[in-house]
Image: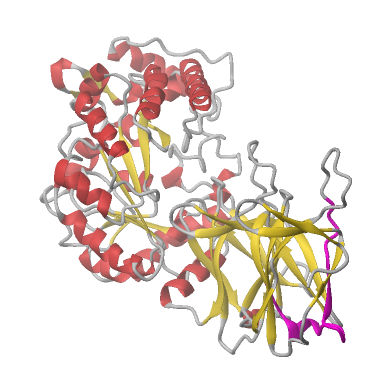
Amino acid sequence: MYGAGFYEAEHDGVRPFRWMETTAVLRLPVSGEGRGLYFAVGNPSSEEQPLTVTGRRATTLRLPPGWSDAAVALDDIAPGPEGEITLSCPHRLDVPGETRRLTLMVGEATLGAAPAVAPVTLESGFYGEETDGIASFRWMRPEARIAVRQANPGEWLLFSVKSPSVWPEELHIADDTEDAGFCIHILPGEWQVVGAPLALLKNAERVRLSSPYVLAADSDSRTLSFMVADVRIGVPTAYEKNSAIMHREVFKAITTESYPTCLACDTSAECNLRCSFCVLDKVLRDKYENPAKGLEKISLIVEKLLPLASKIQPYITGEPFFRDDIWTIIEKAERIRQERMIEVEVSTNALLLKGELAEKVLRSCITSLLVTVNAGTAATYKRLCGGDFATLKSNLLALRESPLRKASLVVSLSFVLMRENMEELPAFVRLAQEVGADAIQIWPLNSVAAEMGEKTSRDGFVFNYRQQMPRYYPRVTRIMLEKCLGLADALGVRVGNTPAYRMDDAHIEDIPYPIPAREFSALADSFDKRSPGESTGQNHASGAIRKCYFPWSSMYFTTEGDFAPCMHLVYKGGIANIASDDIESAWNGEAMRRLRRSIMSGEVDEVCRDAQCPFVSAV
């Protein structure tokens, strides 16, 4: 069967194979009409390589790095009169001292039934298959092509995609006859379903995906853009259609056809801690008729929106594991997960995560645990949160060692940055490494807190919200964040979110800390008279507001039914109430249309002007 262009047989310990030159001949024993040729092929390059299989006709396969299985329908290539076909690959392996002209490794070739014609084929621009614990996927290059066969009326091209970027990134979908096609936005975070009706493309047989976004990864020499999984054609489900439309409407529609795909809802306002900096105590708790209330007012919202969601966060204010209501949401997500991907993120102080509860959490469909720590030492943890640091650490170590922990579960440690704790950032990073956390998240003290005065907590500690805002301490904030990021890099701790403060003006001096509240207030008033962007970290002219996608993708609602598209507006009391079944009037109400309109025009809406988020703060 092996002809000219093949070297002698070898064995790599897994399979027998022969090296081939840039062109090699296979001779088949029969004409092979209605049959298929099957063989394993190894690509030793770190890049995708083409392999052209030629008889009287030709077809080209795209080979990812490593071994892969190739299948060719012989009717497609029509072998020569003596059953001969030619394999060709232009890439020659460069091995010092090797005199042979090596390209690919070809395993034993066999004949079998003709392979089924795939409705979609990844033609070019994709690397080999990998997994992230949730999905099997392929990295996409900045340009890739998909071949589509036998599409029926009403069918869509659909695929799941995940972006490593922290910003929304453009993805253009077109056919080979169009320059641009149409643009969708891939959002940061969870796996999302995107796509479009094939009828929108002039030539739906070959679809081109392209993006200006390229992942900057020093540890990977490949040219990577997005993670792509489950490419298919078909009639979309309600979830798939809603998700695909949402990604087309981001930054384009003021009144949307789609509903949000990321949901966050309170399952309880109760908590086992009383953190000094908790906004719930000063802003939200008085609004609750009964803080122990669970899902009574929002169950209808959950029933309507969860089937359309790609991500659910069953927490906002309290400790979600303090009551059993959270399991109502998780069990609904579990049923959805049996049919498709859905990500479930829970934020917890982890003090209750032991014994049966820890086992229940680890066995569940929760994909992300965000553990609030907010300190690096036991003393500061006790002072700020009132909890036992040893219990927290013990529970985290037990999670790390548990045989029940799945590879798909991401455990991150969270740190709300304020003046009282910022010098413990390095200790926080070391804690993350010790307990085996997958990542750390650093968040700014919410700007709403600056209006809330003082709060006296345990042991007489007085927490002055305004005095704790990092913006009044640009020098020490910058130094501690730099130390934190440097140490995290050295210890191999992945850093997720970090605050978007602008603190590069050397002439701005920190306000001394600690000092009496009255003295601080006078200095802070003077500090605030400086220009925005110089003194407060806010830079409304940066243009980042144009990247805020939350009013199209996200819905946060409390047990009282107060609704907002992001946490900042939740802390402000929400922008509407959807305790009834009238979701549409809230989602496309005047407040939401105004937010979308202002973002599309590059303006910061009044309700967002003091937000400590990367879309409003200087970056």
Q: Looking at the image, can residue 445 be seen?
A: no
Left or right: 143 as drawn, with respect to 81 = left
Left or right: 42 as drawn, with respect to 572 = right
277 to 122, vertically: above or below: above
Residue drawn at x 55%, y 25% is: 534
Quarter in which the C terminus is drawn: top right
280 to 360, vertically: above or below: above
Q: What x and y, as percent, mark residue 244?
A: 52, 69
Q: Looking at the image, can residue 344 be seen?
A: yes
- Which range of residues does the magenta coloring cover? 71-92
Q: What x and y, as percent, mark residue 50?
A: 78, 63
Q: Is residue 81 covered in magenta?
A: yes
Q: What x and y, as percent, mark residue 347?
A: 30, 44
Quarter in which the N terminus is drawn: bottom right
276 to 239, vertically: above or below: above
Residues 43 and 277: in front is 43
- Give residue 397's quadrant in the image: top left
Left or right: 535 as drawn, with respect to 38 = left
- Give residue 128's quadrant in the image: bottom right
Q: What x and y, as percent, mark residue 418?
A: 36, 24
Residues 560 and 593: in front is 560
